[in-house]
């Protein structure tokens, strides 16, 4: 039987190279990538996976040329305001992870808009990481924990590894399968805490070409992995 990962994460990489290889401007790759995300999110959350986390824009992506950053921010607004009908129709709830600081008001407003519009949806959760950095997330969580200790809401001895999840930008379960497109094999400051026992799948395919068929190949690979979580294979356990 096919195992369905509960939480899938994707580093949607290679938009720029997809476009450059076709003699197009990089931004065309971002446009195509955004279109692919919409289709893919519906497919993935229709296979029984409950959570899909995608890396859309890292805190470090602000270091790119201003024209590319502006294009991406405008693309996000357009997507969130008018191009997520299919996602909403498919009963998917959209949430965001990342820092609000440095994001334009109109971007924040578009994020708010799609979050609100989809807030009662139940089939699955699409977590979009925008202005996201994982070390930043862990630092921000730690500050919130320290504050709650200072305010007497929790005791220092209550802090454990499960509690950290509750203080992350979004309280979502650990990631089971992490996919990175475009051939790069690195994490680029993505979900360092939540990937602890995740299976990692790397493909040379650029994100604008990473369609449902390509995703199903990742699921096949996932099904051939043996997840041991530190135990041994025969299933015997020292409890
Ligand atoms: C991923 O594609 C999208 C973002 C980081 C916003 P890239 O823009 O990184 O594409 P490449 O890696 O340069 O090809
Ligand atoms: C990671 O990709 C961020 C996103 C996909 C949004 P990058 O293209 O920014 O990562 P590096 O620079 O290759 O590590
Ligand atoms: Mg890249």
Image (tube, grey):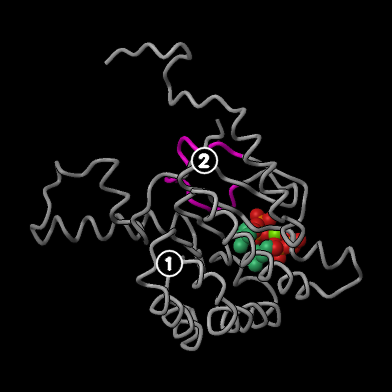
Tell me, yes or no, whether the two marked residues, 1 and 2, touch with CB atoms within 8 Å: no
Asked if disc 2 is less than 8 Å from ligand 2, the answer is no
Residue lying furthest bottom in this view?
106
Residue 131, above or below 146? below
Residue neighbourhood size for the residue with mark 2, other residues' Cα within 10 Å, grouped as few (<14), some (14–19), many (≥20)? some
Image quarter where ligand 3 lies: bottom right
- Range covered by the magenta-colored residues: 187-200
Q: Is residue 13 left or right of residue 55?
A: right
> Which residue is painted at 55% across and 77% down in the image?
85
> Which residue is painted at 46% across and 87% down in the image?
105
* Residue 110: assigned label: none
Residue 152, above or below 130? above
Tag count: 2
Residue 144, above or below 34? above
Magenta stretch, main secondary structure class: loop
Q: Is residue 149 left or right of residue 210?
A: left
The reply to whether the magenta stretch includes residue 1 is no
Percent x, y of residue 66:
67, 81
Helix, strand or loop at mark 2: loop
Percent x, y of residue 207:
72, 58
Please identify the quarter of the rendering in which residue 206 is found: bottom right
Tell me the quarter of the image containing the C terminus.
top left
Q: Where is mark 1, residue-wise?
A: 93
Q: Where is mark 2, residue-wise?
A: 4
Residue neighbourhood size for the residue with mark 1, other residues' Cα within 10 Å, grouped as few (<14), some (14–19), many (≥20)? many
> Which residue is painted at 21% across and 56% down in the image?
146
* Cα distance in 3D space between marks 1 and 2: 19 Å
Q: Is residue 120 left or right of residue 107?
A: left
Tell me the quarter of the image containing the N terminus.
top right
Percent x, y of residue 27:
75, 75
The reply to whether the magenta stretch includes residue 195 is yes
């Amino acid at each position: 039987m096919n195992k369905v990962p509960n939480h899938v994460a994707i580093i949607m990489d290679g938009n720029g190279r997809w476009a450059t290889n076709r003699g197009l401007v990089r931004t065309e790759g971002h446009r195509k990538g955004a279109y692919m995300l919409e289709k893919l999110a519906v497919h993935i959350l229709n296979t029984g996976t409950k959570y899909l986390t995608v890396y859309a824009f890292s805190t470090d992506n602000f270091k790119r040329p201003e024209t590319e950053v502006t294009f991406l921010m405008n693309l996000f607004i357009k997507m969130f305001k008018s191009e997520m009908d299919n996602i909403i129709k498919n009963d998917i709830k959209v949430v965001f992870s990342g820092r609000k600081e440095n994001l334009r008001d109109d971007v924040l407003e578009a994020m708010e808009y799609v979050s609100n519009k989809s807030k009662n949806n139940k089939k699955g959760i699409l977590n979009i990481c925008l202005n996201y950095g994982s070390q930043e997330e862990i630092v921000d969580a730690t500050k919130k924990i320290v504050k709650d200790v200072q305010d007497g809401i929790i005791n220092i001895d209550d802090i454990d590894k499960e509690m950290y999840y509750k203080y992350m930008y979004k309280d979502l379960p650990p990631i089971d399968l992490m996919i990175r497109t475009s051939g790069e094999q690195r994490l680029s400051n993505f979900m360092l805490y939540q990937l602890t026992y995740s299976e990692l799948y790397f493909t040379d395919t650029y994100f604008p070409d990473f369609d449902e068929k390509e995703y199903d190949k990742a699921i096949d690979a996932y099904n051939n992995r043996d997840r041991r979580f530190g135990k041994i294979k025969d299933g015997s356990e020292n409890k």
